[in-house]
Image (cartoon, rainbow, N blue to C red):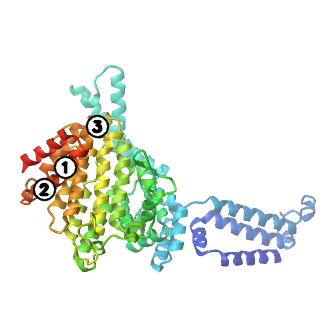
Amino acid sequence: MDLLITVLTLLAAVLAITPRERQLDIRVRIRTFDRSVVFFGIFAVLSLEFYEFLQRHLSWLPPKECWPQGLTPKNATYLVILVVAATLWIRLRFAKLTRSKMSTFRELIEELYWNGNYGELFALLHTHLKSLFRIYSSDYFLPRLRERLSPISSIRSTAFLIDELAKAKGAPPLTQANNSTGRRYYRRIRSSISHTAWRVLRLLPVDDTSQDSSRELIRGVFLAPKFLTALAQTRPYLGLEIIELSTQSFERAEFVDLFVKELLRDHHSVFYREIQNNQNTWHERYQLPESNRFLYFFLKDVSIAKKLNIYKPVGDSMLSYLDDLTRHPLGDAYNRTVDRDFEDVESWHSPLFVGVQFFDIMVKEALFQKMEWHMWLYYMPLVIERIVRNYRLTDPLVEPEYEFPTRYGYILYRAFSSMRDWILAVEHIPSDQANVKLKSTSVSYDENSNIPKSSIIAMTRCLYYVLQSKHIGHRTKRSLAGMVFDIYFDLRASGNFDSYAQVLLSAILGVKSYEKSQHEYRKTLTELFEAEKDEYLVKRSEVHVAEVEAAINLGT
């Protein structure tokens, strides 16, 4: 008896010092069988403790003399406790969240959420995340069997099988039979399958309670603002696990959107840190080390980024941020002068600068991974339009004659540099690669699968917004326009990308042709080109310079 009391006391002490998340985990893992093992162990220990008493009143119990040599009721107690402890350890070690425990799990998660115990909540979620999404998608034998036996599924599967057999024998498919006999035969088969499937389905048990609990948990907690904020700040990589496992979840796209936006709100999040730590390039392409888990998850296979629309929360956050700055122009720090602190430190905490860097990494990965989609690089003109709207030279420390006198100007330069790289990447990619094969030189012909052409259209739209602005200085306009003209000359100089050069020139002259400010844009463009013409004649081919001049003058 003393041994049992000692063991129970020790167990109570261990549970008292066990972390709360571990206690909650045990509550989720323990099942009826485990309780039965505990009750059996206590009953066996008590029976062995009072064996002599029970043996006198229960004649069928063998006397102690009949026990194996060396084994007594007292030392058998140790064996029972050892077996029970080992059984429980193995059971709890490998037990997972089950459908019968889904309601308990949901109550625990909601309790932790409303109490703000996010550390314990995330630890419990991390342990049972796979099982949670398995319950969500009903990835079990009986639900899968019910789905297979559903009348519609059964009819389709059988019809396909019958048609394949008919084709193998050279006969026309029954589902497409023109004669009345074939159609009547097919209808009989379909009716027979439907009735049989319904009869079998009625025999299978239905349990939607656990699935409903898992879906309510995901909708009610996973998409809650407080949960997402805590997740982004304390366990961001758990968010990646949620995204990876939620392939069958209807809430997946919404979760990605909200989660990434939360990462962008926190200037010290893993999003900012990984962008800053991901600056190594190799052959015009960024390296993606596995240590940068966020970028590696979305961009190692860029089709994942496309499928999850990762560009949308990043682009929308940049636009929303700029709109907020528009509402508070006096406090807009981006109209201040660019200093060393901003270039080296503060820029890496800027949603605008880091957002541009993310698009740069993503679009280049799409280019080199042969993705036939522009990855919504058209967010760049929207961002540049808002930057131009907010741009002012009101800071007394700003030097207007500088090339990029403000922080906005510095970000403009980085955005234009990125788009230049996307265009000139054609020089480093096989010409027969699908996402760089040019189908038409017309800018009105949509080629969303062609990233360089999409980049040309996006860049010329950005140039339009810059040149028609009354607040951006002449020196900045001249530098950005010169960058665009240099792209044209680089494409023409190689001799292999004349078609892309033609697209660029057409885009420069045809951008926003329906706008009232088009005349002022053309006038500014002509003045800027004439100002740099002598330098172009020194460094570039006279023929190519004459082509641009003639096109601009003709357009004007």
Q: Quadrant of the N terminus?
A: bottom right
Q: Using the rendered image of the protein, determine whether residue 448 is visible from the camera's viewpoint.
A: no
Question: Where on the picture, by quarter, is residue 490?
Answer: top left
In the image: residue 50, left or right of residue 476: right
- Tell me the tag on residue 527: 2
Q: Nearer the viewer, residue 46 or 38?
A: 38
Q: At 20% from the left edge and 56% from the top edge, which residue is drawn?
A: 463
Instruction: Quote the CA–CA distance across marks 1 and 2.
Output: 13 Å
* Comes first in the chain, label 3 or label 1: 3
Q: Using the rendered image of the protein, determine whether residue 174 is visible from the camera's viewpoint.
A: yes
Question: Where on the picture, by quarter, is residue 331?
Answer: bottom left
Instruction: Name the front one of labels 2 and 3.
Output: 2
Q: Indicate the position of residue 159 as horizontal and vertical percent values.
A: 33, 34
Q: Indicate the position of residue 289 as horizontal and vertical percent values.
A: 50, 52
- Tell me the tag on residue 494: 3
Q: Nearer the viewer, residue 509 or 351?
A: 509
Q: Nearer the viewer, residue 50 or 119?
A: 119
Tag 2: residue type?
A: Glu
- Tell me the tag on residue 534: 1
